[in-house]
């Protein structure tokens, strides 16, 4: 990026202006995420910096919004904070319940998406795979089709999963999937699958097939070859695919709004309700926690990507 | 063992393994071509079997639901299922027949029956979709018909309400007598059928959908342009800096990418409010007065700003990966041949970035066209997109067929763009992070 020696003064001026513009765009990218963090410690129910906060007066800051995350929905929030108070938090606090549902749904949908997606990616990256392009396009489509359309279709399907069978002349009756954990898990697995496929096939592009052949020639059966040779090499890709799938589920609100029942109140749904009804700085406290969570995820994925490149012998240029 | 992984390894050609006919043979005496064909067939089957579970899964949980939605967009049996006798009369008599005594008798019988089964509301709702303001006509008739309607039916029903004699109503009921209809698609492009079955434009105050489609298209275009204007310099900077520095700056692009969508939308709501941080800073700097605080949210501006921020990484990442591969010596050569830096950029550098630009722009546009959450939260009424209308019909008016028809039209547009993307960029080249 260094300026060449022959640059004219005008070009120099433009170069520095360009750097300033870039800095401004980076500022635009990062500021909304950074600004919610201090605001979540606001002692007042406002969404802007109070004069006390700007003068770094400790009384301008408080943990009250984080505390309200625990007490919201509790039966006896004012009871002394002993073991029974924490038991109350665990069983009744709405945000705690939301976290539990989000983790359950996220975990199982990630498992389904990762297992099916990795198998499919292994098949798709074989040169012999028939109809590769069209199948790939179909498997990626849940990511491309707008979520509102997917959720609309899922709403019809999950409220009456047997209806499609009537198209082929059958007439069975079955229960609903809407309003159950199973329904939301399947829906989120569908939405997470494209991410697993994309990351795992990207890992397999540089995969050296002769390693598997070498294992086979040394007497390993296909299963051993898979678990001892292929799996460790593609594992970084599989894990980052799984993380993508988990984040997709953890952040998904439209499908949940359409097909989940009152029991599947996830964090995004609780946030959505909070923002639509009465937005309070408690939302910013949740946002801060989620930002910290995404920083942790980003770090993990970056480390995995580098490890994967090192394993496959691709050095950054 | 070995053939499990590499089918071709199983084929061993014996030295001089040619028979009298001159064909090559494998160790077990089969013609080589046949053995090869079989082994490659086996390899294809094996690859396909790996993909099959997921293919079935996506088929059941994604393709079938979309199919169900498409079916719903042309099918609504709210009238035909609950008004069987009148539907049969419509079936037997061609369009243009005046309702005779049999028709009025069928109407009376159906009204009584569905009032007793308590689904007259469903019937009224179905007719109301095509002819607004008629739901109460049905529910009122249902209340009066509960004890049965005495002949002569025509006079008895017209005595309930004069509107029952309206030829438009009969035309609409004739349409609804078949469970399959294209009327929801017509309504989705602000058209309807008049008494004679001709397609006419909806009255001006009811024309909303075409305007919304246009607005969705226009706003997506604007957002694609703003992401390009902001993304291009950033991608260029990241691509030309040394790896260490650019990796560090890349975090600033990837962190928003990994942060929850709702968090980013909330952050913009907080920043752009009238009592929010941006307005406070502008007042403090003296650019605007305290009474003249800007309205930057709950309108189109809010939608554009927030969506530009959210979709910016989708523009930067493809641009960056293309720019990284551009050889800097081309620009240097152009400069050495006397091009000004602007000419060198315009004629040499920029054309080479076009593949990344195309990929990023298409991706951003496809994602923007279907956006729901952000416009719903920061868009107010002027920043709503077509997806918000779909959600409204799904959750508030419960006109599911209408929602499905709108969704089907949007889906058609998105799939067309997806096809273009696959043609130009290739779906395998989609990269994340």
Image (cartoon, rainbow, N blue to C red):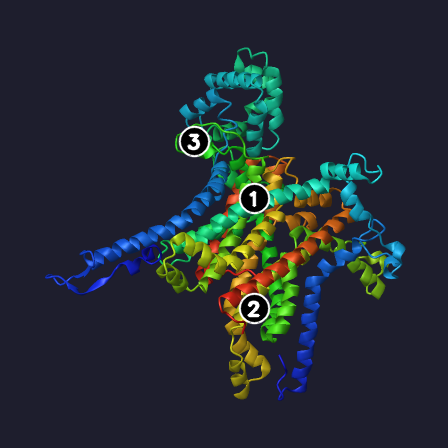
Q: Could you tell me how far apart the alpha carbons at marks 3 and 1 are, in whole angstroms?
A: 30 Å
Asked if residue A301 is positioned above or below residue B204 in the image, the reply reads: below
Q: Which residue is mark 3?
A: A166
Q: Quadrant of residue B395?
A: top right
Residue reaching furthest to the front: A219
**A18 relative to A199 in the view: left or right:** right
Residue closest to the eye, B406 or A84:
A84
Q: How far separated are the C-alphas under marks 1 and 2?
A: 34 Å
The chain containing the residue under callout 2 comes to B
Q: Which residue is identified by label 2?
A: B320
Does residue B237 show up?
no
Q: Nearer the viewer, residue A207 or B145?
A: A207
Residue at position x 55%, y 77% in the image? B346
- Compared across the picture, whether B16 is left or right of B337 comes to left
On the image, the x and y values in percent for residue A128 come to 35, 57
Q: Nearer the viewer, residue B247 or A233?
A: A233
Location of mark 1 (residue): A108
N-term-proximal mark, 3 vs 1: 1
Whether discs 1 and 2 lie on one chain: the answer is: no
Element assignment for label 2: helix
| Mark seen at residue A284 | none
**Residue A173 location (% of width, % of height):** 48, 27
Looking at the image, the residue that sits furthest to the left is B20
**The N terminus of chain B - image quarter:** bottom left
Q: Are marks 2 and 3 in contact (CB under 8 Å)?
A: no
Image: B133 above or below B210: above
Q: Position of residue A211 (x, y in %)?
A: 41, 63
Q: Give SS at disc 1.
A: helix
**Residue A209 percent location from the top left of the image:** 40, 62
User: Alpha carbon of mark 2 to alpha carbon of mark 3: how far?
Assistant: 50 Å
For discs 3 and 1, the disc positioned in front in the rendered view: 1
Q: Tell me the element at label 3.
A: helix
């Amino acid at each position: 990026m260094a300026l060449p020696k022959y640059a004219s003064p005008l070009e120099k001026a433009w170069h520095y202006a360009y750097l300033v513009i870039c800095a401004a765009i980076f500022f635009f990218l990062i500021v909304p995420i950074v600004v919610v963090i201090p605001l979540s410690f606001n002692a007042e129910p406002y969404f802007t910096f109070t004069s006390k906060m700007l003068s770094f007066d400790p009384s301008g800051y408080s943990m009250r919004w984080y505390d309200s995350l625990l007490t919201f929905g509790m039966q006896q929030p004012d009871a002394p904070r002993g073991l029974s108070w924490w038991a109350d938090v665990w069983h009744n606090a709405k945000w705690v319940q939301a976290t539990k549902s989000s983790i359950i749904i996220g975990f199982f949908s990630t498992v389904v998406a990762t297992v099916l997606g990795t198998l499919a990616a292994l098949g798709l990256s074989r040169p012999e795979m028939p109809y590769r392009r069209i199948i790939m396009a179909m498997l990626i489509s849940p990511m491309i089709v707008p979520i509102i359309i997917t959720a609309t279709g899922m709403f019809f399907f999950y409220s009456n999963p047997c209806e499609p069978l009537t198209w082929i002349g059958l007439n069975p009756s079955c229960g609903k999937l809407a309003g159950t954990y199973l329904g939301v898990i399947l829906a989120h697995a569908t939405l997470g699958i494209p991410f697993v496929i994309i990351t795992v096939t990207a890992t397999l592009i540089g995969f050296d097939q002769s390693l598997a052949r070498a294992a086979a020639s040394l007497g390993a059966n296909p299963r051993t070859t898979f678990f001892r040779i292929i799996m460790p090499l593609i594992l970084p890709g599989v894990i980052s695919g799984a993380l993508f799938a988990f984040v997709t589920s953890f952040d998904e609100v439209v499908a949940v709004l359409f097909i989940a029942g009152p029991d599947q109140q996830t964090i995004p749904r609780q946030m959505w309700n909070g923002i639509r009804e009465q937005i309070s700085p408690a939302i910013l406290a949740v946002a801060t926690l989620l930002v910290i969570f995404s920083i942790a995820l980003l770090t993990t994925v970056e480390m995995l990507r580098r490890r994967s490149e090192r394993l496959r012998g691709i050095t950054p240029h | 063992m070995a053939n499990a992984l590499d089918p071709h390894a199983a084929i061993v050609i014996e030295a001089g393994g040619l028979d009298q006919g001159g064909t090559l043979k494998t160790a077990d005496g089969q013609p080589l071509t046949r053995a090869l064909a079989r082994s490659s067939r086996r390899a294809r089957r094996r690859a396909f079997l790996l993909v099959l579970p997921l293919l079935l899964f996506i088929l059941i949980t994604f393709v079938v639901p979309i199919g169900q939605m498409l079916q719903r967009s042309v099918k609504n049996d709210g009238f035909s299922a609950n008004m069987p006798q009148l539907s049969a009369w419509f079936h037997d008599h061609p369009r243009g027949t005046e309702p005779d005594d049999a028709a009025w008798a069928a109407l009376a019988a159906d009204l009584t029956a569905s009032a007793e089964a308590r689904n007259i509301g469903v019937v009224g709702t179905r007719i109301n979709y095509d002819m607004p303001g008629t739901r109460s006509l049905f529910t009122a008739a249902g209340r009066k018909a509960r004890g049965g309607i005495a002949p002569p039916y025509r006079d008895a029903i017209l005595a309930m309400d004069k509107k029952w004699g309206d030829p438009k109503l009969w035309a609409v009921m004739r349409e609804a007598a078949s469970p399959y209809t294209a009327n929801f698609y017509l309504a989705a492009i602000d058209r309807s059928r008049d008494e004679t079955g001709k397609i006419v434009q909806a009255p001006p105050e009811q024309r909303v959908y075409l305007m919304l489609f246009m607005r969705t298209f226009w706003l997506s275009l604007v957002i694609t342009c703003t992401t390009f204007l902001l993304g291009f310099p950033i991608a260029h900077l990241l691509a030309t800096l040394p790896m260490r520095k650019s990796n560090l700056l890349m975090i600033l692009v990837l962190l928003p990418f990994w942060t929850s969508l709702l968090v980013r939308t909330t952050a913009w709501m907080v920043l752009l409010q009238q009592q929010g941080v941006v307005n406070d800073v502008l007042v403090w700097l003296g650019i605007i007065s305290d009474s003249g605080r800007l309205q930057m949210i709950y309108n189109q501006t809010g939608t554009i700003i927030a969506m530009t921020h959210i979709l910016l990484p989708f523009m930067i990442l493809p641009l960056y990966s293309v720019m990284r591969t551009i050889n800097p010596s081309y620009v240097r050569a152009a400069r050495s041949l006397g091009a000004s830096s602007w000419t060198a950029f315009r004629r040499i550098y920029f054309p080479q970035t076009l593949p990344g630009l195309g990929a990023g722009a298409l991706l951003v546009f496809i994602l923007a066209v279907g956006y729901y959450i952000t416009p719903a939260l920061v868009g107010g009424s002027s920043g709503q997109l077509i997806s918000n209308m779909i959600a409204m019909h799904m959750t508030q008016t419960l006109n599911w067929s209408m929602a499905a028809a709108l969704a089907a039209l949007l889906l058609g547009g998105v799939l067309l763009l997806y096809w273009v993307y696959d043609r130009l960029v290739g779906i395998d080249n989609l990269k994340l992070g």
